[in-house]
Image (cartoon, helix red, strand yellow):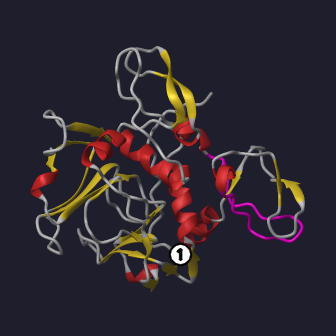
């Protein structure tokens, strides 16, 4: 339970998903991550991830509003791909509607209620997420995130406890007067340490000479949370000019058979058994990092079920 009125220093809640690269032995982190401060600029009284959170406050219903890990994870996915959301309820039973997987990145009007099992139509074409009930009730305003100016250049050998890499994603509740930082979030552990030596968001990150792109990290993090894209996100180079391809916009979540090189315009089909693919150079970069790692990266699986048309 989280009483937002008790934390005058500000609260922040995010959808937490596993890192895109993880050479630690830390357990999987998933759900709703909470930061809370009682005083502005003070220490964090709360810095934990929960599978679900019930939020209370003066402006909220007496019973509070429940936020599940799926609500938080799919809020992250929709936000990273640039889609707004709204609070949608079933016109038959009033159940709050969550659009998952394919539906979390494709606005639509006809929905299938998870409460009563009936199809219903909303008043507009949109993506449903119950989190917007909290945002609307709290009068949350969205502050534009500012790119981090911090830089990081490290070697994996200096952190035998392992390294974790996430892309930043917008908090669904942010009450601090200070803007969020946007970039790549890094945890780096010394040997046998329970707390990370590094725990920051950086605008530029280089690990063992490999430069990481914040947009590629953020995109892969969201792609990894969409079960319908399982095994379809790959590093793909143009066979003509050898330029690494990076699918953005709708192509970042829409596998295709034929693509056109963004550098030379050559039209080609990516090699491999799966014909419909999405291009992101980051898996290839992370594979090279894994060759220099002190231990093999963990393979995290959220275990979410695919939901597509």
Q: Classify mark 1: helix, strand or loop.
A: helix
Q: How many marks?
A: 1
Q: Quadrant of the C terminus?
A: top right
Q: Which residue is mark 1?
A: 292
**Could you tell me which residue is drawn at 80 percent across and 53 percent down?**
270
Q: Position of residue 176 (x, y in %)?
A: 25, 65
Q: Is residue 292 visible?
A: yes
Looking at this view, is 23 or 137 the one in front?
Answer: 137
- Please identify the quadrant where the N terminus is shown: top left
Please provide percent x and percent y for residue 24.
Answer: 37, 65
Label 1: how many Cα within 10 Å (few below 14, some 14–19, many 20+): few
Residue 136 in the image: above or below residue 282: above
| Residue range corresponding to the magenta coloring | 231-248
Q: Is residue 171 magenta?
A: no
Check the image and report above or below for 234 versus 99. Answer: below
Above-or-below relation of 187 to 79: below
Residue 75, above or below 217: above
The residue lying toward the viewer, choosing from 115 and 156, is 115
Q: Position of residue 220 (x, y in %)?
A: 55, 57
Image side of residue 206 versus residue 181, left or right = right
The residue lying at 37 percent from left, 76 percent from top is: 160
Q: Main secondary structure of the magenta part?
A: loop
| Near-viewer residue (143 or 48) | 143
Is 29 left, or right, of 238 in this rendering?
left
Task: Please give left or right for residue 2 compared with residue 235 in the image.
Answer: left
- Of residue 10 and residue 28, the one placed in the foreground of this image is 10
Q: Is residue 28 visible?
A: no
Q: Position of residue 216 (x, y in %)?
A: 58, 65
Taking the spot 15% from the left edge, 72% from the top edge, the residue there is: 43
């Amino acid at each position: 339970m989280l009483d937002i009125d008790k934390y005058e220093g500000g609260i922040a809640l995010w959808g937490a998903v596993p890192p895109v690269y993880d050479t630690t032995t830390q357990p999987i982190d998933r759900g709703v991550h909470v930061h809370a401060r009682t005083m502005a600029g003070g220490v964090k009284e709360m810095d934990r991830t929960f599978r679900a959170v019930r939020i209370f406050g003066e402006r909220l219903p007496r019973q509070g509003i429940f936020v599940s890990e799926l609500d938080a994870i799919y809020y992250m996915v929709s936000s990273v791909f640039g889609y707004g959301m709204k609070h949608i309820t079933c016109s038959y039973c009033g159940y709050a509607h969550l659009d998952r997987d394919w539906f979390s990145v494709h606005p639509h009007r006809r929905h299938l209620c998870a409460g009563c099992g009936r199809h219903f139509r909303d008043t507009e074409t949109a993506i449903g997420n119950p989190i917007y009930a909290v945002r609307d009730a709290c009068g949350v305003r969205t502050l534009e995130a500012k790119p981090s100016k911090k830089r990081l250049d490290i070697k994996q050998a200096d952190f035998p406890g392992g390294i974790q890499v996430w892309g930043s994603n917008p908090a669904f509740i942010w009450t601090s007067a200070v803007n969020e930082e946007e970039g790549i979030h890094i945890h780096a552990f010394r040997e046998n340490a329970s707390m990370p030596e590094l725990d920051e968001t950086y605008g530029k990150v280089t690990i063992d000479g490999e430069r990481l792109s914040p947009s590629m990290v953020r995109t892969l993090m969201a792609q990894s949370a969409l079960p319908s894209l399982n095994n379809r996100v790959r590093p793909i180079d143009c066979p003509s000019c050898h330029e690494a391809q990076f699918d953005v916009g709708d192509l970042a979540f829409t596998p295709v058979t034929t693509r056109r090189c963004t550098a030379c315009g050559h039209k080609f089909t990516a090699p491999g058994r799966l014909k419909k693919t999405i291009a992101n150079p980051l898996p290839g970069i992370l594979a090279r990092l894994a060759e220099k790692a002190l231990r093999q990266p963990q393979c995290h699986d959220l275990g979410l079920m695919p939901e597509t048309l």
